[in-house]
Amino acid sequence: MEKIIDENKQGQPLILDQKKENQRKLFIESYGCQMNFSDSEIVASILAKEGFNTTQDLEDADLVLVNTCSIREKAEQTVRKRLEKYNAVKKINPRMKVGVLGCMAERLKSKFLEEEKIVDLVVGPDAYKDLPNLIEEVDAGRNAVNVILSKEETYGDISPVRLQSNGVSAFVSITRGCDNMCTFCVVPFTRGRERSRDPQSILEEIDELVAQNFKEVTLLGQNVDSYLWYGGGLKKDFEKASDFQKATAVNFAKLLDMVAEKHPKLRLRFTTSNPQDMTLDVINVMAKHQNICKYIHLPIQSGSDRILKEMNRLHTRQEYFDLIDNIKSIIPECAISQDIITGFPTETEEDHQDTLSLMEYVKYEYGFMFAYSERPGTLAARKMVDDVPEDIKKRRLAEVIELQRKHSEYRHQAFVGKTVEILIEKESKKSDAHWSGRTTQNTVAVFPKGEYKIGDFVMVHIDECTSATLLGEAVGYSDNN
């Protein structure tokens, strides 16, 4: 999954109810994609059973864990800077142990212990259930490493601790790993082969969230459209399954339909999709259910057929256009966002113009845009020369960002004068007199608080907009409350 959350944002763990005295304290922060944030909730749940309460106070922590991202160099640099901070604290608090989790741990493995002298344990994304044993090793004065990738682990039996929860929205992981092998991406090497979670465990987790009065769930995976449950096992082995397994298999469209049907008042989102795997069945299920949000994150990476081929993206520019046309035909109000990489090896000015023209065709609501950075271990790093000068990468990136800003403002302007449903999620960052929430299209809206509260579905009349935010006035509760 390529979508990136703010790589510089420090996690703010939730303090759990302390039921025992003198329990050890865990400080955990996450960087990168939503999957890392979801994994941190699994880790917190596993360690809660081992006597760890999470804390926001780094200086008072017995165990500090950083859940890392390797998808871009900047993400790894951010983690190394945080380790410098931990080192300073560890000198004051020598009992503190430090661990590295996630994709960076998987990529660097035991090398991390040599490079970062303060690190006591290194744990890959499939080894979190081994944390109790690894911590015992560390307590005994030995460094500990487990980065073995699994073909079965989905953590479907773990009930996550909802860190940073607003009590309104939550992530539910449905797949792990990826089989697509895009040449720029480390995910297949750091998270392993693609496997799907038992749909019954997904439904049970969502049942728990609904019982706790959560109002929105995002189904999460590196590539949700590849979800396929046929009794367990890797997706690549599906052809070997029995006739009965194939006949009763659950794909993503069926899973989405099951969840939406069971909980018609629950808002549903999903991320991330891959254009080569998204089917018309999924789009039709979205159109069928009002509670499935009309928004798709659909990474393109490049608008050039030649570069798409170099990236091993198994679709063409025209096939992407066809998918966009089908989405807009079946769900006219559907919003679409993108991932775009500028300066991929051998990218020419003509390739770059192809990307800009594709953006003009789609006019995305918003996007996640980056200059290419070579990731060790990927096919691009092994076989291709990073030959686009840095200044050209940055200039092309600036052009992509500016065009996206114009398109975002264009899309948001279409809301002005309309009344839309907003799910209130939090207080506005800029004003404690205003609420912030999102439309079904994932667009942020801000409006005066009035009588409403977090978790309410509210109808808001949009008076004006910026390229990032809708501004309006609440006119009443939605029928969805």
Image (tube, rainbow, N blue to C red):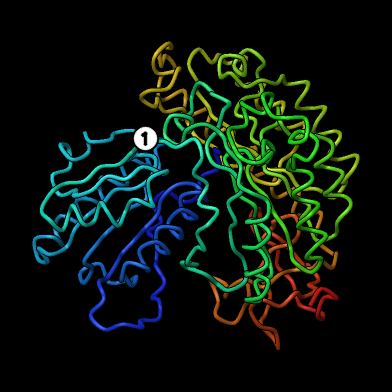
Residue drawn at x 41%, y 16% is 386
Residue drawn at x 63%, y 56% is 201
- Image location (x, y in percent) of residue 335: 76, 47
The answer to whether 391 appears left or right of 400 in the picture is left
Tell me the quarter of the image containing the C terminus: bottom right
Tell me the quarter of the image containing the N terminus: top right
Relative height, residue 434 to residue 231 (above, below): below
Residue drawn at x 27%, y 70% is 25
Relative height, residue 407 to residue 235 (above, below): below
The answer to whether 416 appears left or right of 186 in the picture is right
In front here: 406 or 295?
A: 295
Judged from this view, the residue extending furthest toward the bottom is 451
Mark 1 lies on a secondary structure that is helix
Relative height, residue 451 to residue 480 (above, below): below
Number of numbered labels in the structure image? 1
The answer to whether 175 appears left or right of 72 in the picture is right
The answer to whether 321 appears left or right of 443 in the picture is right
- Image location (x, y in percent) of residue 407: 71, 43
In front here: 41 or 48?
A: 48
- Image location (x, y in percent) of residue 255: 74, 49
Residue drawn at x 70%, y 50% is 409
Q: Which residue is mark 1?
A: 73
Relative height, residue 18 to residue 165 (above, below): below
In front here: 116 or 193?
A: 193
Q: Amino acid at mark 1?
A: Glu
In front here: 412 or 478?
A: 478
